[in-house]
Amino acid sequence: MRQHGTPGRPDALTLDTPDVLAPPGTLPEPVALDAPAREPVVVGVDGSALSLVAVRLAAREAARHRRALRIVHCFNWEPDPRVDPTTDLRQPAEEVIAQAVATGSEEAPQVPVAGAIVEGPALTTLLRESGDAALLAIGDGGLPERVCVPLDATALQIAARAGCSVLVAREHTRPTGQILVGVDGSETCQAALELAFDTAAWRDAELVVVQAWDPDARPPGGEAHLAARFDAALEPMRRRYPTVRVTPRVLPGEPKDVLVEQSRTAELAVASARGEQPWRGMLGAVSQALLYHSPAPVLIVRGPHEVYVQE
């Protein structure tokens, strides 16, 4: 979820009345939350089975954090005298959004759900939406299946440039498993660690906290000493979340390789956007590796001072 206020934008917003796109009576009535209107959880949909998986994940997060769910479908309209845009373009878009709204309402009946059709490129639209969102959920766009991932892949660009944390859904996921988070001692990783503890508590799942170390540079005092220090460093979070079952793992190897391997048994992998080397780009090596190769959904967490980049 959002860990910060976005420069130039309010820290909270009041949702506009949703543009109901399906015929009256076909969509469930939203149920009002006790909490005041705040930044919603936003999910982008394109009519695919994967985008409906993203809707379900987003609906659960909205219920967990008592926020509204905003579902957005983007399409590019091009003038063509041979077609009637009302029936040939708008109607399929309305069907996509209506199915997504119904899915979100079924997954989390207590959550207010709004659907919106936006004309324009998906990347530009969703980046704009992220500026006023607590969390943005999207499908992975087939990233794990690609041998060569284009730099302009929508999921990759959104994960790198969004104004809030980003949840990237996978088509085939484990219904239950561990919550995985990697830490490296950086400030941004602390935000990921806190969110991972909170997620594990809410899902009643085991939390696996991983720290990787370079086997070519033996740590002072040896691996056992490093593991003991790491375990002690987690004590404050354990006290905050006494019900969470925590498994700390100090493992040799490249952090990105270690985290990808550990993610194979995870229900969700959590990582900070840039970790301990923020100057190297909008996404660090670990978050990129998880996006490309983790079979589990990936939650990319923004730190408190990170700025997003829009087109």
Image (cartoon, grey):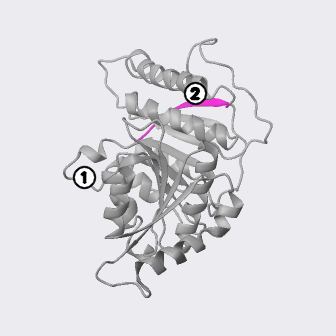
Question: Label 1's element?
Answer: loop
Question: Label 2's element?
Answer: helix
**Structural crowding at the residue carrying mark 2, measured as other residues with C-alpha within 10 Å and reported as few (<14), some (14–19) or many (≥20):** some
Quadrant hosting residue 297:
top left
Q: Is residue 185 visible?
A: no
**Of all residues shown, which one is farthest toward the front?**
224
Residue denoted by label 2: 107
Identify the residue at image location x=79%, y=42%: 36
Identify the residue at image location x=35%, y=50%: 294
Percent across and percent down for residue 127 are: 48, 50
Classified by dominant secondary structure, the portion drawn in magenta counts as: strand
Percent across and percent down for residue 195 are: 59, 56
Height in image: 94 above or below 256?
above
Height in image: 288 above or below 79?
below
How many labels were placed on the picture? 2
**Structural crowding at the residue carrying mark 1, measured as other residues with C-alpha within 10 Å and reported as few (<14), some (14–19) or many (≥20):** few
Residue denoted by label 1: 149
90 or 44: nearer the viewer? 44
**Of all residues shown, which one is farthest toward the bottom?**
220
Magenta stretch bounds: 111-121
Q: Amino acid at mark 1?
A: Val
**Of all residues shown, which one is farthest toward the left?**
147
